[in-house]
Amino acid sequence: MQASDFKNPHTRWHYITVLERTNNLIFMHAVTAKENDKSFIFNEEATKKLNWDKSIKTMFDYRMSFGIGDVYERIFQLCVISLCSDIELFFKKTFETFEYKKGSGKGFYQRFNDVIKALKTAGHNFSPIEDQLSKINLAFQVRHICIHNYGIVDDDFQKNTNTGKLGETYVIEQEQYREMYDAYVALLLHLDNHLPSAK
């Protein structure tokens, strides 16, 4: 997928935004951070001065030494948070640019299903990408618990997604994040073919 595959400047700009800011920066860091930390070797003299345990030889050892679990999971949570922020910005700019009537209440652009409903009311048909929309909706639910509950599954998350174990961290891994990202790209491509020319 290339930016040149988008004919509408509006969708092209938002594709470049999610590609560079979220995918090529945050996601790339998420998939490389653990290995990079394993290759970051501390100077033995420095670890002695810091009075660290002898088992701490790398940045990975240091991060794991606190016993709080896989700290690298948080980076994948940040990928989802960033992705949803990109989508939210796209929705906001789309409604402003094409003068669509937005729904009521605060946080409208954070309520994925409400935004899709408003776009359907404006004449958009999402039947060909319903599967992708469900993945984006899950991303918004994950984002909510990552921001407000540090990624720990609560009753509302279970009710809204039919997934996750109550009281445990909802683990996002590379494959699931990629599905969410690809679903957003599919939404952009779909709207690229159906949005009017930018005003």
Image (spheres, helix red, strand yellow):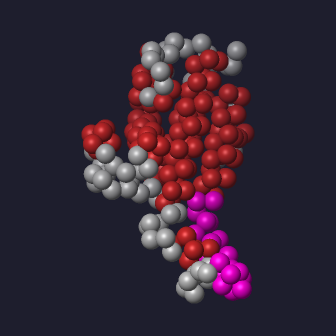
Residue 82 sits in quarter: top right
Q: Judge from the rendering whether residue 135 lies leftward or rightward of residue 28; answer left or right.
A: left
Q: Position of residue 175 (x, y in %)?
A: 48, 58
Image quadrant holding the C terminus, namely: top right
Q: Position of residue 46 (x, y in %)?
A: 71, 81
* Vertical placement of residue 9 versus 122, above or below: below
Q: Position of residue 88 (x, y in %)?
A: 55, 31
Tell me if residue 75 can be seen: yes
Tell me if residue 35 can be seen: no
Residue 172 sits in quarter: bottom left
Residue beneath the point at 56% across and 77% down: 61
Pick whichever, 90 or 141, lies toward us: 141
Q: Which residues are magenta?
A: 29-50
How many numbered tags mark residues here?
0
Residue beneath the point at 55% across and 70% down: 63
Residue beneath the point at 68% across and 81% down: 49
User: Magenta stretch: dominant SS?
Assistant: helix
Pick whichever, 148 or 23, lies toward us: 148
Q: Judge from the rendering whether residue 144 lies leftward or rightward of residue 12; answer left or right.
A: left
Q: Judge from the rendering whether residue 164 lies leftward or rightward of residue 11; answer left or right.
A: left
* Vertical placement of residue 35 versus 149, above or below: below
Pick whichever, 136 or 89, lies toward us: 89
Residue beneath the point at 67% across and 45% down: 21
Is residue 52 a member of the stretch shown in magenta? Answer: no
